[in-house]
């Protein structure tokens, strides 16, 4: 109590010392407005305040674009140099024509600008033109260097996933067939060769592989557009790629540069598409009413802006054999959580994971939330001599991931349709087994190895923006035995 009162007093003393050190307020001037004459702002009515004046910004009047001069040219097999000089004379342009130009032009141009006519001439005769102030320079379309900027990460990536199941059952049987009159020989034959071996095996394997060699493939494609071989020595000087800086320098003609620019524009438009994928992994403990699974059509019957669409294999093999939930507002996903809650009608719902992944076009995104379970394997090495034996034990640590892993590879089309390769994997520990090594048993050493249960699926599906694709059906039966009672009486 003494300490608390001392702190209160100390704070009060500091505050008083601070107020005592403050300077006295200055005296008001004779013409100063008296405080008693001021009007309290709280008594003012809001109606006396005029509304804010909001004026629209003044938009300047549009100025008409300068009309470009147009020309009409109708020629048949006209020499190139004569046609160019005639155009320069009518357009009042100074012109320089390279002496190495030759060729003839057939053209019918009505009311077109000078640039349009020059482009049409360049499509017939390999020329390149440019303006230098008021001078029009015409020269042969010879290869020249031009640089392009490519905004893409310097990355070479390989994704590979394997999903295989193999079972093999081997049985041995003894033949029970005997021939009459030769029982002894038949019996001996059966004794020697009665152990016949038969094998039943079944295996299923799915391997998915994806390689992303953006910069190497880009060099090869541009070289093919230039008509160069991949192993051509000229490729090193005609196509120069700096992946670290995102710069490509190409030696080509103007016509080839136009094709390369168009190719790069389409390439980067497709390569830079990306999609936001929202996934929810649920585990439903079904009640007795729905032992065959979840009836997804009832989700649409409940409303929430969803419609149910199911495509089955039949005459139309274009649509995938899956079903989707179409949401009315593709820009809002607020009711998905409500739809997940509606699954409680079928049983107890447990959300295992709810990830959100932003993936770029044709790039595999991986989500991994696992616990690395550590277990040890023990090896026994016994060395015996005439009198004693020595046993040496060696333990080796191992880790096994247990949790949730999901890989997604999207392909985004120009119509915003997304083709997904989805592979979710859920693993858990179901128990432990002892290593049956007899050397460990003799030494009373237990080496417990975990038993892992894996539930996974892999599918290729096509959905649009706002659609919810559902993958499910991995049903597991489990039996829980619990003893309940009063301690001491239930024994």
Image: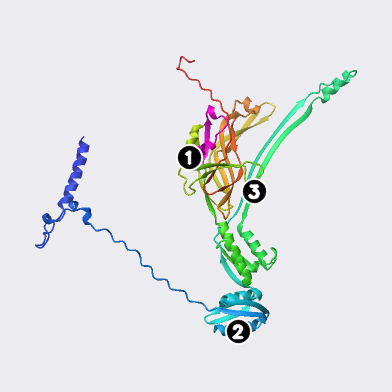
The residue where tag 1 is placed is 303
Q: Does the magenta stretch include residue 223?
A: no
Sequence-first disc among 2 and 1:
2
Q: Residue 48 is drawn in which quadrant?
A: bottom left
How many angstroms separate mark 3 from mark 1 (CA)? Answer: 40 Å
**SS for callout 3:** strand
First in sequence, mark 2 or 3: give its number. 2
Q: What stretch is highlighted in magenta?
A: 280-302
Location of residue 178 with respect to 15 vertically, above or below = above
Residue in the image at 67% along x and 82% along y: 79
Left or right, 468 with respect to 80, comes to left
Q: Mark 3 points at which residue?
A: 209
Quadrant of residue 334 within the rendered picture: top left
Give the label on residue 455, or none: none
Of badges 2 and 3, the one in the foreground is 2
Category of crowding for the residue at label 2, using alpha-carbon neighbours closer than 10 angstroms: few (below 14), some (14–19), many (at least 20): few
Residue 250 visible in this rendered orientation of the protein: no
In the rendered image, the quadrant that contains the N terminus is: top left
**Label 2 vs label 1: CA separation?**
74 Å
């Amino acid at each position: 109590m003494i300490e608390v009162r001392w702190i209160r007093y100390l704070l009060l003393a500091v505050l008083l010392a601070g107020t005592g050190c403050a300077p006295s307020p200055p005296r008001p001037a004779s013409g100063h407005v008296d405080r008693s004459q001021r009007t309290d702002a709280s008594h003012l009515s809001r109606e006396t305040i005029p509304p804010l004046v909001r004026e629209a910004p003044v938009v300047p009047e549009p100025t008409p674009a300068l009309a470009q001069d147009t020309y009409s040219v109708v020629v048949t097999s006209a020499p190139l140099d004569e046609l160019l000089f005639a155009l320069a004379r009518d357009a009042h342009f100074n012109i320089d024509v390279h002496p190495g130009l030759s060729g003839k032009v057939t053209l019918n141009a009505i009311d077109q600008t000078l640039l349009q006519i020059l482009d049409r001439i360049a499509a017939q005769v390999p020329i390149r033109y440019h303006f230098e102030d008021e001078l029009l320079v015409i020269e042969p379309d010879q290869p020249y260097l031009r640089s392009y900027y490519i905004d893409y990460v310097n990355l070479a990536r390989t994704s590979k996933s394997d999903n295989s199941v193999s079972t093999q059952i081997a049985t041995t049987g003894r033949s029970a067939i005997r021939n009459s009159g030769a029982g002894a020989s038949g019996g001996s034959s059966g004794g020697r060769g009665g152990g016949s071996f038969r094998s039943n095996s079944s295996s299923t394997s799915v391997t998915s592989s994806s390689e992303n060699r953006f910069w190497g493939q880009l060099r090869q494609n541009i070289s093919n557009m230039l008509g160069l071989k991949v192993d051509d020595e000229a490729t090193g000087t005609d196509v120069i790629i700096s992946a670290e800086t995102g710069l490509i320098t190409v030696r080509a003609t103007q016509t080839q540069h136009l094709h390369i620019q168009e190719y790069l524009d389409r390439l980067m438009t497709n390569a830079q598409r990306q999609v936001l994928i929202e996934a929810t992994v649920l585990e439903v403990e079904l009640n007795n009413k729905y032992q065959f699974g979840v009836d997804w059509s009832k989700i649409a019957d409940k409303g929430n802006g969803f419609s149910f669409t199911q495509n089955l294999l039949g005459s139309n093999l274009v649509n995938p054999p899956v079903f989707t939930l179409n949401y009315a507002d593709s820009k809002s996903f607020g009711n998905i959580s409500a739809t997940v809650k509606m699954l409680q009608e079928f049983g107890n719902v447990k959300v295992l994971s709810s990830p959100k992944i932003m993936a770029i076009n044709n790039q595999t995104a991986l989500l991994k939330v696992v616990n690395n379970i550590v277990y040890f394997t023990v090896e026994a090495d016994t060395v015996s001599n005439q009198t004693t034996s020595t046993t040496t034990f060696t333990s080796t640590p191992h880790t096994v991931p247990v949790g949730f892993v999901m890989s997604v590879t999207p392909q985004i089309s120009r119509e915003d349709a997304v083709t997904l390769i989805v592979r979710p994997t859920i693993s858990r520990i179901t128990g432990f087994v002892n290593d049956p090594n007899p050397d460990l048993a003799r030494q009373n050493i237990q080496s417990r190895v975990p038993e892992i249960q894996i539930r996974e699926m892999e599918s290729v599906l096509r959905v649009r923006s706002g659609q919810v694709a559902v993958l499910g059906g991995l049903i597991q039966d489990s039996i829980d035995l619990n003893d309940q009672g009063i301690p001491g009486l239930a024994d």
